[in-house]
Image: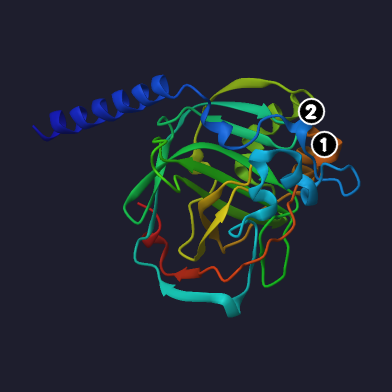
Amino acid sequence: MMMNHSKSISTSLFLLLLLLQILHPTPITAQEVEDETEFDYLKDSGKGPEHWGDLREDWAACKNGTMQSPIDLRSEIVQVRPNKGEVKLKYKPSNATIRNRGHDISIQWKLGDAGSVEINGTDYWLIQGHWHSPSEHTINGKRFDLELHMVHLIPDANVENNIAVLAYLYKIGKPDKFLSEVSKDIKSLINVKEERHIGVVDPRNVRKGSANFYKYKGSLTVPPCTEGVTWIVDKELTTVSREQVELLREAVDDSAETNARPLQALNGRKVQYFYGHESHIRD
């Protein structure tokens, strides 16, 4: 009886996600701009970060927003809280595609297929992951060699603040396992603006997730700089090889070899730091 009940729930969820995609056919990744030719990371090009808010009317938040990302996660601004299971990773293996978007390399999963992250009882569904080098967020003023963003969405256009991003920070050291798994695919996309199917990719291989993390409300770090994004920044560093970072930089446009947006003003926002045991952050 319990098995039939679970099957019924899974079927209902699948039908709901399918209906939402039919009603809202615009790609979920349209939350971030897809045309990399419209902006870059260069200082003197006229299309760099300091100009993003002037390039298009719908990018005004990049200039006028008050909850922009990334930020410096400083010890003196955080509210320290015990981790009581606020974040739970519920990923699963699923078919994926890889895409060179010019400004970054992204791994993309179909909405609903690769699981979700549960934040304070709400599920945000995994849709893609991409890398920035050097890191966009800093901790006590220290910048790191790489940052991975795992982007999640509540598939309902009527829900405000429906985006959540889990961020992981890397320092130079041993190769990263997940990047090693997709390095061949990244190499095949060097300076090639294509999207290719790469078979089953398990997002659980990215990171287990530590019990210590920062949480705050911010924005997308690329145009249109949409605000209301829930950020979870893992405090535990992992390692990536110098060759892996260089590969990510070689694959994208020259104007995005270093694709980290400058730090943004905190503007009095609340930043929380959660600490606890690993079992509190992962099922």
Q: Of all residues shown, which one is farthest toward the front?
A: 57
Total numbered labels placed on residues in the image: 2
Secondary element at tag 1: helix
Within 10 Å of disc 1 (Cα), the crowding (few <14, some 14-19, many 20+) is some
Which of these two is toward me, 128 or 239? 128
Occupied quadrant, residue 218: bottom right
Compared with residue 148, is residue 103 higher up or lower down, i.e. above or below? above
Q: Are marks 1 and 2 in contact (CB under 8 Å)?
A: yes
* Residue type at the position of mark 1: Glu
| Residue at the (45%, 32%) spot, across then down | 93
Which of these two is toward me, 68 or 192? 68
Residue 234: x and y in percent read 54, 59
Q: Which residue is mark 1?
A: 250
Residue 113: x and y in percent read 41, 29
Q: Quadrant of the N terminus?
A: top left
**Which of the marked residues, 1 or 2, is nearer the chain's N terminus?**
2
* Residue type at the position of mark 2: Ile
Please give left or right for residue 175 compared with residue 210 in the image: right
Asked if residue 62 can be seen in this view, the reply is yes
Within 10 Å of disc 2 (Cα), the crowding (few <14, some 14-19, many 20+) is some
Q: Of all residues shown, which one is farthest toward the left?
A: 1
Q: Which residue is mark 2?
A: 190
- Between the residue at mark 1 and the residue at mark 2, the CA separation in whole angstroms equals 7 Å
